[in-house]
Amino acid sequence: MRYLILSDIHANWEALDAALDDATGRYDAIVCLGDLVGYGADPNRVTDWVRANAKMTIRGNHDRVCTSDESLDAFNPIAAQAAWWTQNALTATNREWLHNLPRGPVKVNGFDLVHGAPLDEDRYLVGLDDVLAEVDYLSTRLTFFGHTHVQGGFEVKKRQIRRVPKISNNADEGVLEFDPDALYLVNPGSVGQPRDRDPRAAYALYDTEETWVTYRRVEYDVEEAQRKIRDARLPDLLAERLSRGF
Ligand code: ZN
């Protein structure tokens, strides 16, 4: 079974559309690691599409905060302003669907999906120490995670952890080959708000019959996504950062 792995779309329809176009013919099913909404100007269009087309979606922290009365205090002022805007923009159907998304880890066909970290959806896996704290809780050889908006991941072999490479900034594709004795935490990158200094939309492909994950990057219409953010009077920084990729 060939999976398209999407994460952190963040209401960016132009980025999602380009990623789907780029992945055409290369997958049988879609899984989504959460944060469909927050930051971008198209929360309903993105949610409608994922709701209709993804086989499994888990919730991200923005999906939770934008659909509940949880305090926005944990968010910086810009994220909080975007969350407040999103709460008001979502249709009742989408709000309810996002609110009821399952929390990871969720197992799909032998691999796990989490938003932040296996133990805590709000936790960022950035450094090797962050991963060490989670190693004992990995239940499969392959766990996909998001939340950091950084494409790449970690290999865990006999409690030794190392970073596994992401795509170099001018390539469209990179392949991570599995060592049969290691476990992997793989971040497909963010579709709609990359923060790894590469503004292109990021996603991953995984075929359960194979022993690798493919990372992809694709150009999209950044200007159109920015125009919508500005027209919606969302904070300008949210538009600006899309062209920087951080
Ligand atoms: Zn996110």
Image (cartoon, rainbow, N blue to C red):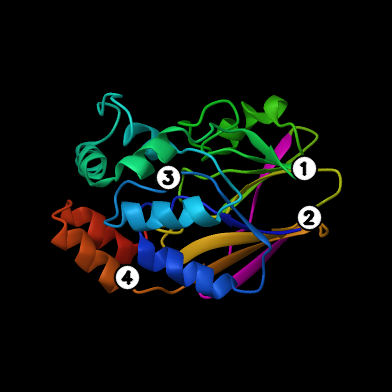
The residue carrying mark 4 has its beta carbon less than 8 Å from ligand 1: no
Between label 4 and label 2, give the one nearer the viewer.
2
Q: Secondary structure at mark 3?
A: loop
Whether the residues at callouts 3 and 2 have beta carbons within 8 Å, the answer is: no
The residue carrying mark 3 has its beta carbon less than 8 Å from ligand 1: yes
Q: Is residue 156 left or right of residue 125?
A: right
Between label 1 and label 4, give the one nearer the viewer.
1
Q: First in sequence: mark 1 or mark 4?
A: 1
Whether the residues at callouts 3 and 4 have beta carbons within 8 Å, the answer is: no
- Specify start and end residues of the magenta stretch as a single range: 160-177
Tell me where residue 104 appears, x and y as whole percent: 57, 33
Q: Which residue is mark 3?
A: 35
Viewer-proximal residue among 7 and 128: 7
Q: Using the numbered discs, state the Cα–Cα distance from disc 3 to disc 1 in whole angstroms.
A: 23 Å
Q: Is residue 169 magenta?
A: yes
Between label 3 and label 4, give the one nearer the viewer.
3
Q: First in sequence: mark 3 or mark 1?
A: 3
Q: Which residue is mark 1?
A: 110
Indicate the quadrant of ligand 1 in the picture.
top left
Determine which quarter of the picture holds residue 224.
bottom left
* Circle 1: residue type: Gly
Point out which mark residue 215 bears: none
* Circle 3: residue type: Asp
Q: Secondary structure at mark 1?
A: loop
Tell me where residue 63 appears, x and y as whole percent: 39, 39
From the image, which quarter does the N terminus lie in?
bottom right
Q: Which residue appears at 61% of the width and 26% of the height?
A: 133
Q: Which residue is mark 4?
A: 222
Q: Which residue appears at 44% of the width and 69% of the height?
A: 17
Whether residue 192 is situated above or below residue 128 in the rendered picture: below
Q: Using the numbered discs, state the Cα–Cα distance from disc 4 to disc 2 in whole angstroms.
A: 32 Å
Q: Secondary structure at mark 4?
A: helix
